[in-house]
Image: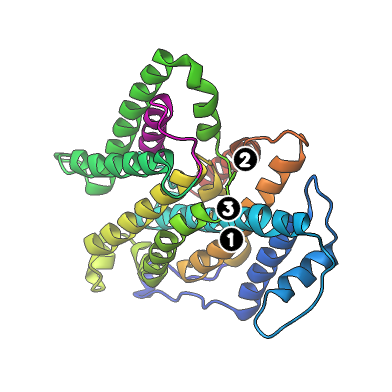
Amino acid sequence: MTTTDQTPEAGRLKPAELRPWWVVSGVLAVVVAGIAGLVLGPAQIGTWDVLVELVDRLPFIDTESGLGERQQAIIWEIRLPRVVLGLLVGAMLATAGGAYQGVFRNPLADPYLLGVAAGAGFGATVAIVSGLGDGIGIIDPIPMMAFAGALVAVVLTYLVGATGGRLDPVTSLVLAGVAVASFFTAIQTFVQQRHSETIRQVYFFVLGQLRTAGWDEVTLLAPYTGVCLAVILAVRRRMDTLAVGDEEAGALGLDVRRVRLVTVVAASLGTAAAVSVSGLIGFVGIIVPHTIRLLFGSSYRVILPLTVLFGGAFLVAADLVARLALEPAEMPIGVVTAFLGAPFFVLILRTTRRSR
């Protein structure tokens, strides 16, 4: 299905509009994944009981779900914040991946392109080996240090990329991201080897998790996600113009440098915030945008809004698999996304090669 005419001969772009039933399908995916996340788990709670309990909390509605205090606590203090956190992290990572693919015109770009993952991993490792916290709570040093490390990595990437010499800005920035990521990964490995007793805790952060102690992580992440997603969605129409190339886009009146800078900053900041509370969850920014592109077309007017919805639903579903696959033990969610993402990555490589 082709929804965008991006041929230079056309002299202008003819992007597709977002159809209402596509949005409805995304909302349904979020609702289904959310309800499944609330119902399924070691403690069996019926679907109807969960729905009645949720409705009972709405203003001016008084119903009786029949659930005890323990079951209500499981829903409101354990499962619901975990589902909401999964929706926020999934939406942010998936949308950041789609935004990077748009501004860099690279189908393999992901949210960790500019060293965010390595910086966050290093920051979290320093906090863990220093015994500063347990990774839970809004003021815990581990997510704070992970966020700071991610931001430092992005800033270094920009500074190094600005000295790219004769390379074009995009290539210079990407190569700088690779260099900065390698640097932070090397330091993180060195620190881990010096404090081998903390490897297990670092290992769980690196592979990602949505373990929460309540609403603290949601409160920490929600403002960043809201602002960053709003900025990315605001420039989605300009990404269609970028698809024709920098020179052609500039000739059409687009400030290419400004659009790319705003998009990359918003995507990087949002990714840093998401990684600080969830750890490193790979492939979300590749799987979801490409699936949307295959199903609904190549216009970023369509891809990015739907990626917000389906990205959140995807990560909640992946977290559900991680919780139930080895019950009562719990698998790192990054293992689930990697299991799905590795063959998907190969498929993208083959598809990209055929299209050239």
> Which span is picked out in magenta?
116-136
Badge number at residue 173: none
Can residue 151 be seen in this snapshot?
yes
> Which mark, residue 214?
3
**In which image quadrant can residue 324 be found?**
top right
**Which residue is nearer to you in this view: 356 or 273?**
273
Question: Where is residue 328, by image quadrant?
Answer: top right
The front one of 157 and 175 is 157
Q: Residues within 10 Å of mark 3 (few under 14, many from 20)?
A: some
Give the number of the mark in front: 3 or 1. 3
Q: Check the image and report above or below for 147 versus 222.
A: above
In depth, the one of 101 and 1 nearer the eye is: 101
**Type of amino acid at the residue the image marks with label 2:** Ile
Our reading of the magenta stretch's main secondary structure is: helix
Question: Given this view, does label 2 or label 3 mark the residue nearer the observer?
Answer: 3
| Label 2 secondary element | helix
Q: Is 267 left or right of 314, judged from the image as shown?
A: left
Distance CA(mark 3)–CA(mark 1): 32 Å
Report the Cα–Cα distance between label 2 and label 1. 22 Å
Mark 1 residue element: helix
Q: In percent of the image, x 47 and y 71: which residue is there?
A: 301
Q: Amino acid at mark 3?
A: Gly
